[in-house]
Image (cartoon, rainbow, N blue to C red):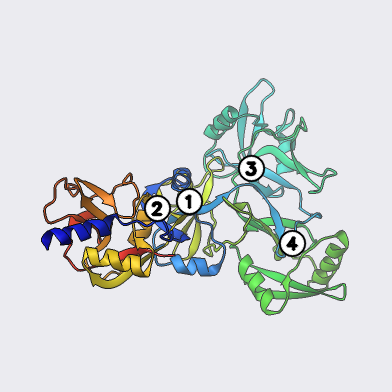
Amino acid sequence: MKMFGLLSFFLLVLHVSAVRPVPGLVNEIIHVKTTMNWYDAKTYCLNNSGLLFVISDKDQLNNISGSANQLSWVGLFRFSVDWTFVDNTKPTYFNWYGQCSAMNPAGYWFVLTCNAKLFFVCKILTGGWVVIRQTKTWQEAQIQCGIPGLAVILNAADNKFIASLLDVGLFWIGLATVQVDSPLKETWRWIGNNNPVTYSQWFSNLFCAVMDWNGFWYDRVCFEKHPFICFKNVGGVSQFTLVNEVNVWSGAQAHCKLLTMDLVMVRTEEDLIALVMYVQNIYSSSVDSLYLWIGLYNNPWYWSSSLLRIQYWNVMQPNNLDSNYRNITPNTQACGALKDGEMFDESCNNALPFFCVATVRSMILVSEPKSWTEALKLCRDRYVDFASLTSNMEQQTAENKIESAQSGYVWIGLNFLMGSWIWVNGDNVRYENWVTGGKLQCPVAQRCGALNVANGMWEARSCDERLQFLCFQK
């Protein structure tokens, strides 16, 4: 009888029928707790038949919120400047006010209105630069510098040297927008040689557009608070509503939606004239400090594997600061990280855990405690087979599945037979995740494999233990 029992067990383990159904394939969102920079995380997901997680709807975000209580990479990155109206159309008409560039001691360039009063840097005829510590508008500074004028920076070495001359604050340099016949009605030029900008060091951010009393537009950080104008088109006529309470840009758009309207969009010069007349009828004289949100925003963020624009930023994000409040410099790529259901911008070089989406075989945790042999039989009778783990992604999926297990260990389809460990469904044992010293070569009683629920490691256990177990399903 004993020999007959061993033979039956042997035949049961080896039985992998040619007509047995194959496991179904599912896309699993897997939280990889090993910390990597964004680029290495993206490569890791690709090497494991997956992609960095792309959020396509709010439900997906809600499903993983419990796993994302620490900053974790997703497949979002800052790519290029892209101005868009709130209805996702691209503007062809702009009315930007001419702007000028200033530089800080770190060497980054900032866009300011030309009437601001700052110190400035002049170029010297004999070569080199000099810092003038008198506050002037950009035009006044250009005049005072004389010939050759404000500093022109054509390469990184010059930029670094000039930055070393500066102390606290911003300093005018010789870069300004000039009106040209282009879709943007302006372009940046170095004053003096009128050459296009081939080297730049902009400190970029996510910006939204405001309009002043005269109808000129400015880009402002989106979490500033301003009043705003809602509108809707009725029979080809724009109807405006000024909301004279301050809000961040996203809050302004949400408020307009409650009124069944949108933040105002300006598509033609005629649209602008109508809007300016509306504003000036309310404010009968010029208000220098008046800025009103309009429905135009600059979105340089893209998902790495699609054109999706769905993003769930924290209300103060993106702000070009990482989680340690260090500046994300313009020459450092910014990438998106998820925490508690909200997006944050981070330097891509920071080491964080990350989310992959991988195609794996579908598994189910069976909660009925069984011996290993009984579990094998039930998996094959009710489902497809005992689960095998042949990759890191399947291992991570299994760890997610067993989080709710009531036992300390969970059976998998691993068995020590004829001197070696095998997967009973015939898979090769190439990937391994044994606990240190746990891969016994000649176990006497411990010849069946289980997952430790606490850490996901493989351990050899007595086959008679009654545990929950993982099966493959269709």
As drawn, 119 above or below 145: below
Depth-wise, is mark 2 or mark 4 nearer the camera?
A: 2
- Going by the numbered disc 1, the residue's amino acid type is Gly
Mark 4 and mark 1 residues within 8 Å of each other at the beta carbon: no
Q: Earlier in the sequence, mark 3 or mark 4?
A: 3
Asked whether, in this view, residue 222 is left or right of residue 320, the answer is: right
Number of the label disc, if any, that sits on residue 393: 2
Looking at the rendered image, the quarter that the C terminus falls into is bottom left
Look at 28% across and 69% down and name the residue there: 405
Q: CA distance from mark 3 to mark 1?
A: 44 Å
Residue at label 1?
50
The quarter holding residue 172 reads top right
Mark 4 or 1 closer to N-term?
Answer: 1
Q: Position of residue 287 (x, y in %)?
A: 74, 65
Q: Disc 3 designates what residue?
A: 102
- For the N terminus, which image quadrant? bottom left
Query: Nearest the camera: 434 or 381?
Result: 381
Left or right of 314 on screen, residue 11: left
Q: Which residue is mark 4?
A: 211
Q: Is residue 251 visible?
A: yes
Q: Is residue 114 left or right of residue 155?
A: right
Q: Callout 3 environment at 10 Å: few (<14), some (14 to 19), or many (20+)?
A: many
Marks 3 & 4, CB-CB < 8 Å contact: no
Seen from the viewer's position, the closer of residues 8 and 251 is: 8
